[in-house]
Image (spheres, rainbow, N blue to C red):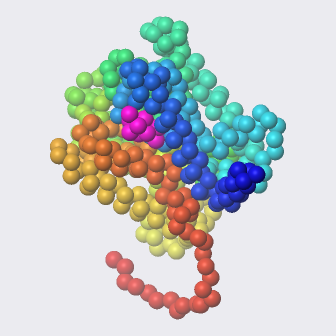
Amino acid sequence: MRRNQILNWGNGKIRRLPPAQLIILGFLAIILAGTMLLTLPIASRTHGATDLFTALFTAVSAISVAGLTLVDTYAYWTFFGQAVILLLIQIGGLGFMTIVSIFYFLLHKRMGLRERLVIMESMNLDEMAGVVALVRRVLIATLLFEFVGAVVLSIHFIPEFGWGGGIWRGVFLAVSAFCNAGFHIMGNHDIFSGVVSYSQSPVLLLTMGILIVVGSTGFFVWQDIFTRRRWRKLHVHSKLVVIITAVLIGLGMLMFLGLESSNPNSIGRLSGPERVLVSFFQSISTRTAGFDVIGQFTLAEDTKILSIIFMFIGGSSGSAAGGVKTVTIGILVLSVIAVMRGKHDLVIFERKIAPTQIINAATLVFIAMLLALIGGILLSRTDGVELIDALYETVSAYGTAGMTVGVLEAVGRLEKTLLMLYMFFGKIGVMSLSIAFMMKGPKESGLTYPSEHVIIG
């Protein structure tokens, strides 16, 4: 009887937690389970138990869809270990509440208000209407895109690796690309080589590029395009996502092409069409996914700075991608333009953007920049790590981009723990953590204060 009372008390406590806290606890529970599975002897090719730190770092990176690793995914982990990592990637890409929804659908159970609120929070939605229908469409669309991508990639890999090896690599890479995870099992060519061996393969790069872009667009945009189907009927958010994503891809490709064409260590040795293809993929992958097609350590200093900016921006809200998000940056840029033109309100597509959203965007970007700067300075204190490389690695971790210039190999466990925390922060989001633990809601003081002007600039 006492045991049942304790369980009921625990369930009651959990059910009373705010949605943001439930999301964080859910991810922590999955990380713990994944860590325990990866420590099993069956998970590693050494047939011995993996040390807890390596398993934990891998689990955090997989659930955060970051892609930073301490060991090569192919060379170190067995099929079982790779399957655990892939499952963590899928959960991290969709959100654990979306995975939980599958069981509701299979058991034909109706979701309660509590579950709908948590799903709404995990997908960054503003309203609860149509949440269940959206989850169904997200699951169907995800499986469809991943299946098509897996088929194309498998056909590409089967001649080289045989039926079993080719299909498994195709499935793994398709899921990892769609979830913007950056994990791969190409270490049979050269450990930690990324997909460098396939830098001249249009089929692989274009297929992965499409999967990455679709996965980083955002679930809300999918829903909007599916239901409204016409540009003029789309929400402002969807229009901004499409436009900003296209601009970033095009601009990134042109800038990378211009900066690296004379660099023989990266793309300078390639033909003209190959340079364009690699630059296109680099523009997409750097911002959200982390698949390395050239070796980031070969980049020039100015290109690294460009990559840091792109990783900082990341993908779009409600997607598998990290970063401060495309619309966040877009709102701030358009606000600056509006102020410079002497306008007091920000109007986009004949819709006024609330001042609180602009403040929230500025707050998020400021906190992310501060975290990146602090992390970069701390990492640069390590012998042999330059500040630009430290910033690159820190922003990559926080933006869950997964790109690396080799800093992980040069730092100790304390610095690796810092990067692990940044990956988790990047996945959950600073704003979600603030809502979960720091903000207790606005309190009306009942007082009205006189306004005052201050000198700015």
In the rendered image, residue 265, in percent from the top left (x then y), is placed at: 22, 29
- Quadrant of residue 171 in the image? top right
- Residue 184 is at least partly visible in this image: yes
Q: Quadrant of residue 54?
A: top left
Q: Nearer the viewer, residue 323 or 60?
A: 60
Which residue does the image show at 35% across and 55% down from the upper left?
372
Farthest bottom residue?
450
Q: Write the residue at 49% across / 7% down.
A: 162
At 33% from the left and 27% from the top, the residue drawn is 192
User: In the figure, 412 relative to 448: above or below?
Assistant: above
Residue 24 location in percent, x, y? 56, 52
Task: From the viewer's perspective, tell me whether residue 192 is left or right of residue 234.
Answer: left
Query: Which residue reaches farthest left?
Result: 384
Q: Which residues are magenta?
A: 51-60
What secondary structure prevails in the magenta region? helix
Q: Residue 419 at x, y = what percent?
A: 36, 47
Residue positioned 41% across, 62% down in the render: 367
Q: Position of residue 312 (x, y in %)?
A: 40, 50
Please identify the quadrant where the C terminus is shown.
bottom left
Q: How many marks?
A: 0
Q: Is residue 426 above or below residue 355?
A: above
* 54 in magenta: yes
Q: Is residue 386 magenta?
A: no
- Position of residue 79 in the picture relative to residue 382 (left or right): right
Residue 216 shows up from this direction: no
Between residues 244 and 407, which one lies in front from this camera angle?
407
Q: Nearer the viewer, residue 16 or 368?
A: 16
